Image (cartoon, grey):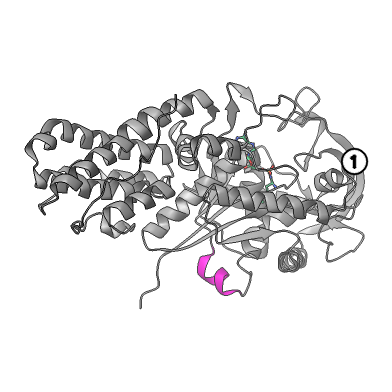
């Protein structure tokens, strides 16, 4: 038998210092959509997410509440898993950087990089942002604060092992030039090329002022810098170097991340892989940031969006839908509950929900008769596939919704409630099948209900197969209007 096509998608591993919020939910749902899409196509999919549990930030957060770090993260990891379940996120593995398996593989990778001559000992003196776990120099700062998160930085002076990032400058530029999709969106790629061309400095890969990390394999006075440990999760989960999954799924099709952590993923990670002689991931996709009603989301502003609260109010599918319809994937977006409600009402309830409810009512009354589905010609499947392959998720939804509009117009025009035309109803139900299959990655639980109601399977190949006629019952209302 021919080997199935594979698809490997990852999310960042999150710091379990707070519960999941809008931002972390966004990346994870995006990964879920891509994983489901490729499952729909019948591919062999591996979807990885998890938690980044070492480092100074975590060590300090645990101390603050008088816990040991492991105890502290264990509780939050439960929260993460629970929220992902509530959001209908169907990952294949949840990696924790405190897993023994991960720690051993990190040491193996670091040893390989060391043996290759890419780690050397020297004094480090500079600045450190604990929330971002990143090194800065005076001239990087913005108004004296961390240029990434805007918070204060601390000076550190310690002996450290440095990774020879500078050695990879030329190779990285080549990598970017030879792989047009290595970093997406394109604007972000150019930004990174410019930064690499400005020159790369070697980066400290170890810390020595605390113990909460993976022990540096060449010198036990050090623990690894948390980013060197965390990035390795993408291959440790596959059991690099000999694991069956590593052979099957690596290189990753896409590392999905937020724009703030692009440097680590598109410069440091590829250089580590180059040093160890491992193939490059195909694409690193950086999405934008959400503001909330025009403001930065932050604890101090007390405007952190809790996904659980929203799904309790509006349902999980309305939340998932809103996130990918309301802003261009790759650009920043603004979250507003008001707009979520508007879209829920006008698009999910009025357009999609009404189509299902009208057609099922009529189909129950008058039945269906097989015919060619000419209405389906209005669905631009080719375009949808192009969008998916470019990770333009908002455009996929747009395209599906313009077909929903076409179906609603068809009902208006053909008036099946007057004509009782079973062939018209057949075409409508067959089109609902196509719509629900394509929307399943975005709003899985609603589409599963529809597939039961109308009796079809959720599988991409079913779109172009004629619908099998079954008795149809008018179902429950899928999206109740919100006042
Ligand atoms: N632990 C690192 C990642 C290591 S990956 C090898 C980390 N963790 S994090 O918990 O801080 O969260 C990261 C993700 O959440 C990032 O991709 C970040 O972009 C995303 N977001 C956090 N706030 C966000 C918004 N307001 N909007 C969109 N995404 C945001 O970084």
Question: Which quadrant does the N terminus fall into?
Answer: bottom left
Could you say where residue 302 lies in the image, as x and y percent from the top left?
70, 26
Magenta stretch secondary structure, dominant: helix
On screen, 10 above or below 128? below
Q: Nearer the viewer, residue 259 or 326?
A: 326
Could you say where residue 363 lies in the image, as x and y percent from the top left?
18, 46
Question: Which quadrant does the C terminus fall into?
Answer: top left
Residue shown at 39% from the left, 37% from the top:
479
On screen, 35 above or below 290? below
Q: What stretch is highlighted in magenta?
A: 243-250
Q: Quadrant of residue 458?
A: bottom left
- Residue tagged by mark 1? 156
Q: Does the magenta stretch include residue 240?
A: no
Whether residue 182 is visible here, answered yes or no, is no
Could you say where residue 182 lies in the image, as x and y percent from the top left?
51, 49
Whether residue 21 is visible here, answered yes or no, is yes
Residue shown at 27% from the left, 57% from the top:
455
In-image side of 284 versus 125 (left or right): left
In-image side of 377 versus 337 (left or right): left
Residue shown at 22% from the left, 42% from the top:
361
Q: Does the magenta stretch include residue 244?
A: yes
- Label 1, secondary structure: give it: strand
Residue furthest to the bottom in view is: 1
């Amino acid at each position: 038998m021919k080997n199935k096509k594979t698809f490997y998608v990852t999310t960042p591993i999150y710091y379990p210092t707070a519960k999941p919020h809008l931002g972390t939910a966004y990346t994870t749902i995006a990964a879920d959509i891509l994983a489901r899409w490729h499952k729909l196509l019948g591919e062999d999919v591996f979807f990885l997410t998890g938690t980044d549990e070492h480092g100074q930030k975590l060590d300090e957060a645990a101390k603050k509440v008088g816990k040991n770090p492991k105890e502290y993260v264990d509780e939050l990891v439960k929260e993460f898993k629970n929220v992902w379940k509530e959001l209908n996120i169907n990952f294949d593995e949840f990696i924790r950087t405190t897993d023994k398996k991960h720690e051993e593989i990190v040491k193996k990778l670091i040893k390989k990089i060391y043996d290759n001559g890419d780690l050397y000992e020297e004094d480090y003196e500079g600045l450190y942002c604990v929330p971002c776990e990143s090194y800065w120099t005076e001239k990087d700062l913005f108004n004296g604060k961390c240029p990434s998160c805007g918070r204060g930085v601390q000076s550190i002076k310690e002996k450290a092992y440095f990774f020879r990032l500078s050695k990879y400058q030329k190779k990285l530029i080549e990598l970017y030039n030879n792989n047009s999709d290595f970093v997406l969106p394109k604007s972000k790629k150019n930004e990174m090329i410019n930064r690499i061309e400005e020159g790369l400095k070697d980066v400290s890969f170890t810390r020595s002022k605390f113990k909460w990390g993976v022990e540096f394999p060449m010198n036990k006075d050090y623990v690894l810098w948390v980013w060197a440990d965390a990035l390795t999760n993408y291959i440790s989960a596959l059991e690099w170097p000999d694991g069956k999954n590593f052979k099957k799924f690596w290189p990753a099709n896409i590392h999905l991340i937020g724009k703030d952590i692009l440097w680590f993923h598109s410069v440091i990670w590829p250089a580590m892989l180059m040093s160890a002689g491992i193939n490059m991931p195909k694409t690193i996709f950086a999405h934008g940031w959400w503001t909330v009603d025009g403001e930065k989301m932050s604890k101090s502003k007390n405007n952190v969006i809790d996904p659980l609260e929203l799904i309790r109010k509006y349902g999980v599918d309305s939340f998932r839908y809103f996130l990918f319809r309301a802003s261009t994937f790759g650009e920043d977006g603004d979250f507003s509950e008001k707009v979520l409600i508007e879209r829920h009402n006008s698009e999910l309830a009025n357009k999609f929900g009404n189509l299902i409810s009208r057609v099922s009512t009529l189909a129950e009354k008058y039945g269906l008769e097989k015919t060619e589905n000419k209405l389906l010609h209005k669905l631009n499947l080719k375009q949808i596939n192009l969008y998916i392959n470019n990770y333009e998720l908002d455009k996929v939804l747009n395209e599906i919704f313009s077909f929903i509009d076409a179906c609603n117009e068809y009902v208006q025009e053909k008036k099946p409630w007057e004509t009782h035309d079973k062939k018209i109803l057949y075409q409508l139900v067959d089109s609902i099948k196509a719509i629900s299959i394509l929307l399943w990655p975005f709003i899985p639980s609603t589409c599963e209900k529809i597939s039961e109601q109308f009796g079809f399977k959720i599988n991409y190949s079913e779109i172009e197969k004629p619908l099998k006629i079954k008795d149809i019952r008018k179902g429950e209302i899928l999206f109740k209007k919100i006042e």
